[in-house]
Image: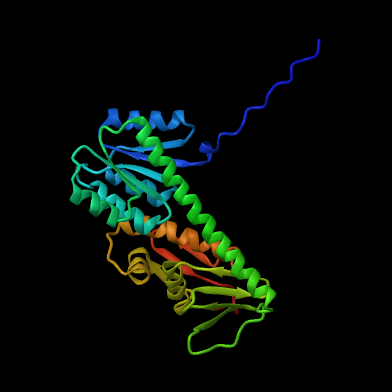
Amino acid sequence: MNPVAKKSPSRNPSTSYRLLVVDDEETMRRSLADILRLEGYQVQTAPDGEAAIALIGQETFDLVLLDLKMPRVDGLEVLRFAARAAPDTQVILLTAHGSLESAIQALRCGAHDYLIKPASPQQILDSVKSGLSRRTETNQKRLVIEQLEASLRALKGIEETPPPSEETQWNWLWDDVQVDLKRREIYWPDGLVRLTPTEGKLLEVFLRSPRRVFAHRELVLLAQGYETTDWEAPEVLRPLVSRLRRKLNRVPGGKRWISSVRGSGYVFDPPSGES
């Protein structure tokens, strides 16, 4: 008798997605989490808006299912925080007290979708899949654009730094590495890194005052333009600094330029001879 070949289990693509469920009603929170886990998603939960803000500031989530009506910190406040601290994260708002005005306000604040409780499991799953597809498409488009721009520069022989003009603001970083603050681009002979507006502003703040320790609240004000509380500022800043560090890690000599100063903030501290 020939042995029966064992079929290897196929990998569920859902397991690569991290979701956060936020609801102050325990039964609803558990129910939503169970529905999503049965589909293979990695799920964390938060019992209120304050806990959600802390988690979003510390960790990366692909999508957040968020109750609108919660005591103290409501869903719109969490949504606004996510839009600043984790702009790639998709947010779906759920509420039992829906209105046209609240739906419009949620969408204007950056929500992917707005569902009225009790939404069916299929409605929730369809909205989640749509949100995750949107996130994936956005990330893929950004990556393709970066790769095409880098390839185009290489094909045109623009690996050599173009001469400064009235539209560029050049700063030397290290050896052949330069940054154009206006275009938010870091160049070196074999590569290019593009920064988001907020990442570019943060790097500009560091470049103008190397080796100076910036407090969290000061950096949020200088880089993002708004005041925060002492407890909120580190949570807002942490994902932004993390993204900038990841991009600088791709730049020759760019590792460990940004250091955390425990209990104080951050410092841009290139080795002697840089900046």
Q: How is the image coloured?
A: rainbow
Out of 171 and 37, give the one closest to the viewer.
37
Residue at 42 percent across and 33 percent down: it is 36
Residue at 36 percent across and 63 percent down: it is 216
Horizontal placement of 51 versus 213: left or right?
Answer: left
Q: Position of residue 218 (x, y in %)?
A: 34, 69
Look at the picture and state if 128 lies above or below 33.
below
* Residue lying farthest to the top in this orientation: 1
Residue at 59 percent across and 88 percent down: it is 163
* Residue lying farthest to the right in this orientation: 1
Quadrant in the picture for the N terminus: top right
Out of 82 and 258, give the one closest to the viewer.
82
Q: Position of residue 21 (x, y in %)?
A: 35, 38
Horizontal placement of 159 versus 58: left or right?
Answer: right
Quadrant in the picture for the C terminus: bottom right
Q: Position of residue 104 (x, y in %)?
A: 24, 53
Indicate the quadrant where residue 37 lies.
top left
Residue at 38 percent across and 46 percent down: it is 55
Residue 173 visible? The answer is yes
Residue 255 visible? The answer is no
Look at the picture and state if 269 lies above or below 123.
below
